[in-house]
């Protein structure tokens, strides 16, 4: 089908259904949510200051200020509930779901920080947010196909009907499809997709076909599966697949993957694209509450640990900022030793020595091989690296390494593990309790905050 004709047809369908008219009236909701978000962020600082005061509160006036702020937030949330009585467009729903999750995260933090006197008001806010979440789920359930989702490329992807044959181009996508409840519609995956275990069983039984690797997916194999939806991540080969499949009328959605917020957004996009938005909202809410709990634990850290996360040995690739792995380090309470660099840059052994990380975390790299390489290049200067002298170099392998390398909902499991490695004292342990090789075999259960 000619691309221009397809676009015109899509516009006609949307016009007939009347999304703009049916779901009008909610566009300012995101602004309201952002205002509430700002108020709660400010409130968090106030409550923490009050809690640290020896008497519990610095003054009666401050207590009244906190109460007034809580009442203002409650008023905003009630206003949101009123607005949610009107339906919203799909894009509005995506943004609302993410904003509600952000508010839930902040309220969960407040619940841990606030005094008993404030708990009732915080619980009331949480109940109001839960009601909004339920209403968003109800609205999303009423929004039938066709749908339009905005992906990481900025494209508005038109999906005419509920996808029944989905191809995943990345392990993180496969995992996200599983969490939103769309695994049963997978017909193709990349060769590295292995979670949940059912995926491998489905491959063995011929229910799912492999379509190549992450970096070299086969367009021919994808076409042979006759998919009605293909989902990848924001990587060059997946963008190329998207471009090549345009001429075949197959919708391709590219997910963002550079931050934890991108993971949240990806969950919502996948939920909308598959018709499982209600489940996606639940997953995002659960993720946000876990992040809040980890953040609260990290507040107990006095001296932050500087961390170098190395993902490749020769040459040395590290995780810099603008990566979800950087966010994992920061949520765990650490400081990224290479947070001044973007993406996954290549560094030298001298760069590593100059950064002086307190902890070095290796992803699927043998510790002995790593140390040998450092000694060969640095000689005795290797002893100037605190992580070396303090014997705080760890390699993460197996399923835990997968969690660390995939921007999927499973980040809620890897962040507590990283926090445990960095600050074992927060979990009633010490650095000598942490094994050099960290895997499901050496740490069968991830410590919970």
Image: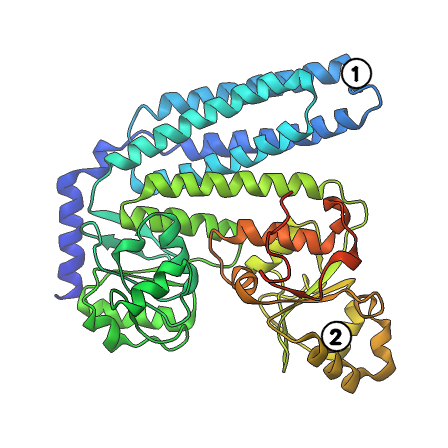
Would residue 339 be found to the left or right of residue 183 on screen?
A: right
Provide the residue designation for mark 2: 351
Is residue 391 visible in the rendered image? The answer is yes
Image quadrant where residue 9 sits:
bottom left
Along the line of sight, the residue nearer the viewer: 390 or 341: 390
Residue in the picture at 13% in, 48% down: 12
Along the line of sight, the residue nearer the viewer: 297 or 351: 297
Looking at the image, residue 210 lies above or below residue 286: below
Image quadrant where residue 225 sits:
bottom left
Q: Give the SS element for disc 1.
A: loop
Would residue 131 be found to the left or right of residue 372 on screen?
A: left
Provide the residue designation for mark 1: 59
Q: Give the SS element for disc 2.
A: helix
Q: Residue furthest bottom?
A: 376
Q: Badge 1, how many Cα within 10 Å: few under 14, some, many 20+?
A: few
Looking at the image, residue 195 lies above or below residue 124: below
Residue in the picture at 86% in, 74% down: 383
Among numbered discs 2 and 1, the one appearing first in the sequence? 1
CA distance separating discs 2 and 1: 49 Å
> How many numbered circles are shown?
2
Residue in the picture at 19% in, 73% down: 224
Quarter of the image that includes the N terminus: bottom left
Residue 116 in the image, given as x and y percentages of width and height: 68, 18
Quarter of the image that includes the C terminus: top right
Would residue 152 be found to the left or right of residue 107 on screen?
A: left
Q: Badge 2, how many Cα within 10 Å: few under 14, some, many 20+?
A: few
Residue 131 in the image, given as x and y percentages of width and height: 41, 25
């Amino acid at each position: 089908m000619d691309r221009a004709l397809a676009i015109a047809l899509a516009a006609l369908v949307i016009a007939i259904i009347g999304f703009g008219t049916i779901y009008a009236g909610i566009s300012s909701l995101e602004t309201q949510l952002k205002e509430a978000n700002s108020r709660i962020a400010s409130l968090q600082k106030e409550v923490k200051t009050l809690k640290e005061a020896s008497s519990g509160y610095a003054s009666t006036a401050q207590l009244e200020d906190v109460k007034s702020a809580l009442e203002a937030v409650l008023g905003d949330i009630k206003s949101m509930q009123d607005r949610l009585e009107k339906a919203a467009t799909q894009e509005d729903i995506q943004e609302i779901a993410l904003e509600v999750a952000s508010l839930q995260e902040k309220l969960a933090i407040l619940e841990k920080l606030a005094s008993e006197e404030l708990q009732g008001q915080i619980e009331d806010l949480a109940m109001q947010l839960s009601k909004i979440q339920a209403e968003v789920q109800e609205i999303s359930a009423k929004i039938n196909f066709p749908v339009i989702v905005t992906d990481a490329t900025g494209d508005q992807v038109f999906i005419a009907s509920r996808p029944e044959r989905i191809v995943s181009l990345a392990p993180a996508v496969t995992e996200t499809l599983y969490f939103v409840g769309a695994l049963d519609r997978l017909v193709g995956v990349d060769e590295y997709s292995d979670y949940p275990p059912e995926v491998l069983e489905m491959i063995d039984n011929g229910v799912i076909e492999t379509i190549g690797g992450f970096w070299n997916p086969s367009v021919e194999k994808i076409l042979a599966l006759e998919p009605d939806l293909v989902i990848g991540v924001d990587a060059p080969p997946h963008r190329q697949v998207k471009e090549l499949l345009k001429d075949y009328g197959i919708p391709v959605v590219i997910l963002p993957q550079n931050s934890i917020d991108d993971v949240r957004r990806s969950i919502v996009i996948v939920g909308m694209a598959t018709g499982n938005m209600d489940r996606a909202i639940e997953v995002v809410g659960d993720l946000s509450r876990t992040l809040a709990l980890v953040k609260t634990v990290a507040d107990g850290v006095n001296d932050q640990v500087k961390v170098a996360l190395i993902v490749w040995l020769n040459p040395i690739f590290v995780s810099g900022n603008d990566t979800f792995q950087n966010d994992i380090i920061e949520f765990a309470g650490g400081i990224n030793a290479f947070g001044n660099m973007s993406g996954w840059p290549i560094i030298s052994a001298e760069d590593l020595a100059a950064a002086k990380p307190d902890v070095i975390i290796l992803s699927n790299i043998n510790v002995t091989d790593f140390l040998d390489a450092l000694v060969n290049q640095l000689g005795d200067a290797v002893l100037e690296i605190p992580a070396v002298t303090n014997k705080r170099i760890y390699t993460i392998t197996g399923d835990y390494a997968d969690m660390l390398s995939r921007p999927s909902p499973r980040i809620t499991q890897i962040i507590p593990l990283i926090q445990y490695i960095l600050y074992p004292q927060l979990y009633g342990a010490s650095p000598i309790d942490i094994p050099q090789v960290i895997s499901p075999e050496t740490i069968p259960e991830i410590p919970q905050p």
